[in-house]
Image (spheres, rainbow, N blue to C red):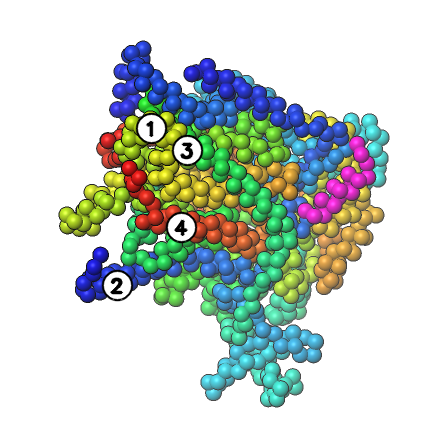
Amino acid sequence: MKRTTIGKVKYRLNVALVTGITAACLAIYLVPFLFMIFTSLKTQGQISELGAPIWPAKAPVFLYQDQELEVYNVPFPDGTVRTMAALNKARTYTDFIDISDDPEYTADNPYHWTGYYASLKRPWKFSPTWENFKIVWEKIDYLRVMGNTMFYAIVTNIGVLLSCTLVAFGFSRFRFPGRDFLFMLLISTMFLPGTVTLIPTYAFFKWIGWVGKWWPLIVPAFFANPYDAFLIRQYFLTLPRELDEAAMMDGAGPLRILWSVILPQSWAVIVAVTVFHIVWAWNDYFGPLIYLSTRPELQPISVALSRFNGIYGQKPYLIQAGSLMALVLPVILFFAAQRFFMQGVVVTGVEK
Amino acid sequence: MKKTLLVLAALLLATALLLPACAPKPKKVQIRWFVGLGTGTDANQVPVEQEVVADFNASQDKIELVLEVVPYESARDTLSTQIASGNGPDIVGPVGWEGTNAYRGQWLDLAPLIEETGYDINQFDPDLVAMQVTTDGQLGLPFAVFPAAVYYVPKMFDEAGLNYPPAKYGEKYVMPDGTEKPWDWNTLTEIAKLLTLDANGKNATEAGFDREAIVQVGYYPQWQDALHMAAFWGGVSADDYYDEDYNAIIPDAAKEAWTWYFNGMWGPQPFIPNASLAGSPEFSGGNVFNSGRAAMAITHFWYTCCLADFRDAGNEFQLAVLPANPKDGQVHGRVDADTFRIWKGTQHPKEAFEVLTYLVGPAVKKLAPVYGALPARPEYQQTFLEAKSAEYPFVTSWQPLLDGLAYPDVPSAEGWLPNMTQARDRIASFLDLISNDGTVDLEAQIEQLRQDLDVIFKK
Amino acid sequence: MEQLISFRFRRVSLRKLSAKDRREMKHGLTFISPWIIGFMAFTFLPMVATFIFTFLDMSITEGIYNPVRFMGLGNYKALFQDQTVWRVPSLRVVWTQEIVEDGIKKQIFSPQVKMDPPGAMWVTVVFGIYALPVGIFVPLALALLLNSRYLKAKSLFRTLFYMPYVVPFVAAVFLWGGILNPETGWANRFLMQLGVPKAALPQWANDVFWVYPTYIIMGIWGIGNAMLIMLAGLQNVPTELYDAAKVDGAGPMAIFFKITWPMISPVVFYNLILSVVGLFQYFLVPLVVNQGTGRPGGATFFYNLKLYKEFFTYQKISYGATMAWILFVVILIVTIILFGTARKWVYYAAESA
């Protein structure tokens, strides 16, 4: 489309405005994420250190006669500020000595400063604790746990896509008595809180011997769940029937219609459900916990990470580090799936 | 159509039922050991537990011991689901009285098994054995004891020019000006106030103290709930809260303890962090002493499990003895006695008992250090203390903790209450409220608590 | 709703179904059979079981195989009379107070205005009034923004906006709790930098006024999914419609209301239903952030939180199951109403062909 100069300027302005607003919203939205990154790079000591900045920092120390003295930025009456080490700390005063090679103030002649040392600024050094990631990697056997998670996510995803598309197709494209009642029944299975159905479900799985194995988590995925079936059904209902009817005129059976007509138009929702589901499986916690509690080698990452949440003290820096590590794959997946969300790639109603 | 569907469904169900039958049946007796009601779920404790399990399995071939570790916040739900579905674990532990009483009536009386197998129960201190007896019988064997003491940070005392708290029971405390005071809660309060600092270095007693900018606190009741506080203050045990007719009583000592705690957070000279402050990441999310920002804390031996961050940051702690009640001059302590228990519905009580005796026997060597558990058996205590000293080399003496054994809470502060789970939940709500909100009328809240507990106890 | 009614009329003439209709029925049922089989095998029995529990007196420690006694409708009666669930907050005046003087109980005249803490159902509904619009319109606005042709680096933005949804709950709660900590959190420290006096700082999750905004802010990280679904819906709007509209000279408002909104209304409806279900099942956040106490002032005492407490904390299986089934009925009624109104504003291209 040819654009005039004014059109071009208007376009550029719009781009700047929209992108700017989005970036600003994103910045605020991701502030906790920054907190997450910072926390994952600290030790508890760094978090609790008095006066510590929000970024991972190490309080500098000065080694003096086998003692580690804390270093502060000490203000002098003439307005200058010198970096010095605290020799004797007390509540109302502190004796400082120079840390340079040619010290003016030494242990015999320290600089006596009145005040509370904690109110002074310190020359913090950026000091990220990369070990946190190593610790998480080793302590929960990261590769195996990640493998478990991927297995769980991918296998159940296949099941969900297969079953939910079929079911959604049935509910959206066919009329039969009892359809709306059955659909209502499908939706209503979402209503009962899992808390309550957990015990009979667990008892049932115990009775057929599936506790301690993957089966209770995987097999039901092949039989459609209300959330995804509902979504895909809604989506299918937005697709006009003309193409269906055209294909039917050509003598296509329902499966063929599904395959050649409906699915090619539905990539967006299929990708959405895939991403949707994989992320859900990635973070599914209580199900895997309760069925795999005796098999730590099969547990996915959500359960494994909770091991850093002991009763007498959590290790938030390890949980954050672990969560960051767990984020990576789904985010990459999402980014790669973007292709199907780019307008223009989706074919709408062509191939008549 | 419907017929086909039904046939399909039936086929599927049949396959599902047959699937497990295809798996080979285990020849060994499987015993499940459930960890999570108490300590034992930490990432550094689990490998040791796995070692213990592997050792046991290697030492005999009749029983297969399976470890089940569930994180604490999901442990109750998981255990409840298992028990309700008839699939409870065989052994649960380590578990203290609180966890035990939450599942009252679910534990196996070991007395018949002890007789049957001829297990020598005399190898334990008879007092400790008696501690594990309830109206339901002998519910466990002595595994470990967790006495309590004051943990404190000497550096903070040095900075403030204060003497350290006494390391021996009976010693008096000397104030900076030379006066001697008995080591009781009032004295602890005084020095705690001097040890609570704001960002400008003013302590809580000084004018201009900024309570919104507290950087260091004098005292924290680490991991104590309302009942524990009352026990440490005035020796209140669980059955002091109700009489024979199940009327709820709030003992005076409990009221005093809670008032003291409330004023410690919200009074004009605070020295205890309120819940928001204590729960912040800077204060280690509730693990306040671990953050290195509390001068003193009272808790048990098991707390040594969780001070790694404290130590790694370069801090040091020492131990002192518990303060006495200012009114009666007595020290009221608490001793936890976590152990392992067998679920009543176990299919294999004999095998479970064998595992139990292993856990409180040979396994103690490995388990005690990671649990921070002082072994009940004297012969293991020395190795345990050596392991602790290796972990925290700066501690000059563990004696204050060992001396704390002389001050157990008998009957336990974690003992049974009528309608226990509901009652404890109500008490926890009370503590949560007063820890978070300084504007509440404490008297009224205590009275409200009593009324609510009255209703709960009588249900 | 109309469809529900119309099929009932059709039922009379079932035998009069043409071969074509019968074939359609056969196909339809075959396609939904995976769900039917799964439902029968995995869902139906537990649902029935929990329904049976409501008529018994069960606790966790007895287990489901040893119910104590048959209670009939006792659980339901207790639930309907349970003031902690149904109470609508209202002010009342208490005229006298009981005090103990010299060991004797006396009534003195001391009027006080008391407000009872709201019931759990009320709390859930009120929170829904705040949270549902946010949960529907914020993802929609975001999806529109991220679908705009004026946006550069779309893929990157979409990924970054979705990313927090992947963060596990336990980590996210820590982060938001840390940031919104009234004493040391970034939010209040930032406000102090802006000059807000310490006494005026919001106490976030501790304050009756701020606790719902706090929960909603915490929930903002969870909009990734809804946003994704709306995006998928937006992608499906045929570009020809937009082109035709531009040719007709329609402005952006007209385009949105006449084209975009109707075409995406099915996914908006989906989000609405899911949000309503999620609202009634909301309990994990108040459990973790406010320790499940309902504090401050009972404002976080959600229905499903009470259910969880009754079921797991107090170990009363049957009372919990009763609460669950009443909840089921409530959600069902709301959903049926929503489905009924859907006819008015949800446009299904497939059904109007």
Local secondary structure at mark 1: helix
The image shows residue C135 at horizontal and vertical percentages of: 35, 44
Identify the residue under disc 3. A165
The image shows residue C191, relative to residue B245, as above or below, that is: below
Q: Is there a contact, CB below 8 Å, between mark 3 and mark 4?
A: no
Q: Which residues are magenta?
A: B46-62
Identify the residue under disc 1. A173
Disc 2 residue type (three-letter): Arg
Can marks 3 and 2 be said to lie on one chain?
yes
Identify the residue under disc 4. A338
Few, some or many residues within 10 Å of mark 2 (<14, 14–19, 20+): few
Q: Chain of mark 3?
A: A
Residue reaching furthest to the left: C248
The image shows residue A244 at horizontal and vertical percentages of: 31, 31
Q: Chain of mark 1?
A: A
CA distance separating discs 2 and 1: 44 Å
Q: Earlier in the sequence, mark 3 or mark 4?
A: 3
Identify the residue under disc 2. A12
